Amino acid sequence: MNKRALSEAADKEAGLSGTKLQIAEAALQTLKTKGFAGASARAIAGEGSFNQALIFYHFGSVRNLLLAVLDLISERRMEEYGPTFERARTAPELADLARTIYAEDLERGYITVLGEMVSAGVTDASLGAEVAARIEPWIEMVQRKVEQLLNGTPFQALAAPRDLAFGLVSLYFGIDMLSHLQADQSRAQSLLDLATRLSVLVDAVLPSLREEMP
């Protein structure tokens, strides 16, 4: 399935089509260009060339619409990358996938949108809880992969997969947002390069550790 087909499938999964999808796409673009503070009903409607009353008719509030944008992004990313992530069996494969996701998130502006919503959630507890809930499926997905990689090794008892997954996802989001703030992707790219090199070492160590287990 190509990327366009994956995107269309994800949009349907998120319950968005027709006018609702048009509104969500306008809100996505507004978040990218004007940020959370500038994503008013007027600005979103102007971006999409529709009456702002449609926002409240279909979503009830701007807040609900912006959360729907996060759902849309998450569904699209999960549809596109989830199967590849589940099939990955080695650390280098996962490092390559992380690089791909980062590059495409950057190109599509998803990094900006996620950063804006996370930042807004820091000062708004109820919004923050909603944003965190939408990150949780990614933590759970990474946790399952960590459990798979560490199974049968001494690290399985030393480090809780849940904690490692939380740390890895937090690191990814932190790198995303800091790179966006500094308008400099070179450090993020350097870290991705480092992750690629380290993944080869990790892949070499884990099988031998499994073999040494009684």
Image (cartoon, rainbow, N blue to C red):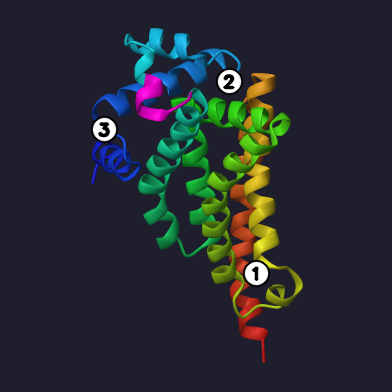
Q: Residues within 10 Å of mark 1 (few under 14, many from 20)?
A: few
For label 3, the crowd category at 10 Å Cα-Cα, with few meaning under 14, some 14 to 19 and many 20 or more, is some
What's the residue type where badge 2 is placed?
A: Phe
Q: Position of residue 3 (x, y in %)?
A: 29, 38
> Percent x, y for residue 68?
44, 34
The nearer-to-camera label among 3 and 1 is: 3
Q: Residue at x 68, y 59 (%)?
A: 164
Between 111 and 44, the residue placed more toward the observer is 44
**Of residues 151 and 22, the one drawn nearer to the viewer in this rendering:** 22
Residue 205, numbered circle? 1
Q: Amino acid at mark 3?
A: Ser
Q: Secondary structure at mark 1?
A: helix
Location of residue 190 in the rendering, given as x and y in whole percent from the top left corner: 65, 36
Pick whichever of labels 2 and 3 is earlier in the sequence: 3
Q: Which residue is mark 2?
A: 36
Q: Residue at x 23, y 40 (%)?
A: 5
On whether residue 56 falls in the magenta region, the answer is yes
Quarter that holds the C terminus:
bottom right
Asked if residue 78 can be seen in this view, the reply is yes
